[in-house]
Image (cartoon, rainbow, N blue to C red):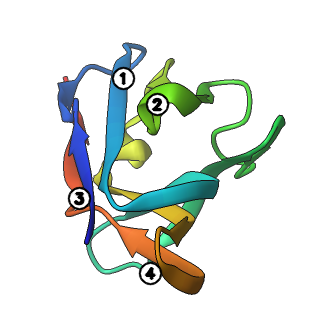
Amino acid sequence: QVQLVESGGGLGQPGGSLRLSCAAYGSIFTIYAMGWYRQAPGKQRELVATISGGSTNYADSVKGRFTISRDNAENTVYLQMNSLKPEDTAVYYCNASLAQGGRPGRYAYWGQGTQVTVSS
């Protein structure tokens, strides 16, 4: 019904930049919020950044380095990651909270995840 497709992960150098994209496809009536989470090996999944309307929220560990943005017309969310650190290495997951056409309620969907590795 709804699919989130992520792209843009890969290998980045310390101090470098990467940009992640996530597009939502399917029977979408409206998207309330989108966000990025990450999970490093042996650790729990954690929030990176969210965007809802004109409001953004960031984890303390990425403030000033990462920027989340959204293209409402394309149902796409981006994560610009600058000043990368080795501790940013993780699988990054896109999340969307949305309403679907013809189905009451609010639903959360996850992308399949994209690997980000920061290493020299």
103 versus 39 height, above or below: below
* Residue 99 in sight from this viewpoint: yes
- Residue placed at 46% from the left, 30% from the top? 78
100 versus 74 height, above or below: below
Confirm or deny contact between disc 2 and disc 4 (CB under 8 A). no
Q: Bin the neighbour count of mark 2 within 10 Å (Cα to Cα): few under 14, some 14-19, many 20 and up.
A: many
CA gap between label 4 and label 1 equals 23 Å
Confirm or deny contact between disc 1 and disc 2 (CB under 8 A). yes
State which tag comes first along the sequence, 3 or 4: 4
- Name the residue beneath numbered marker 2: 78
- Residue placed at 35% from the left, 69% from the top? 110
Task: Say which amino acid is labelled 4.
Answer: Gln
The mark closer to the camera, 4 or 1, is 1
Task: Say which amino acid is labelled 3.
Answer: Gly
Q: Which mark is residue 113?
A: 3
User: Residue 99 placed where, x, y %?
Assistant: 57, 69
- Residue placed at 41% from the left, 44% from the top? 88
Which quadrant holds residue 86? Answer: top left
Q: Which mark is residue 44?
A: 4
- Name the residue beneath numbered marker 1: 19
8 versus 96 height, above or below: above
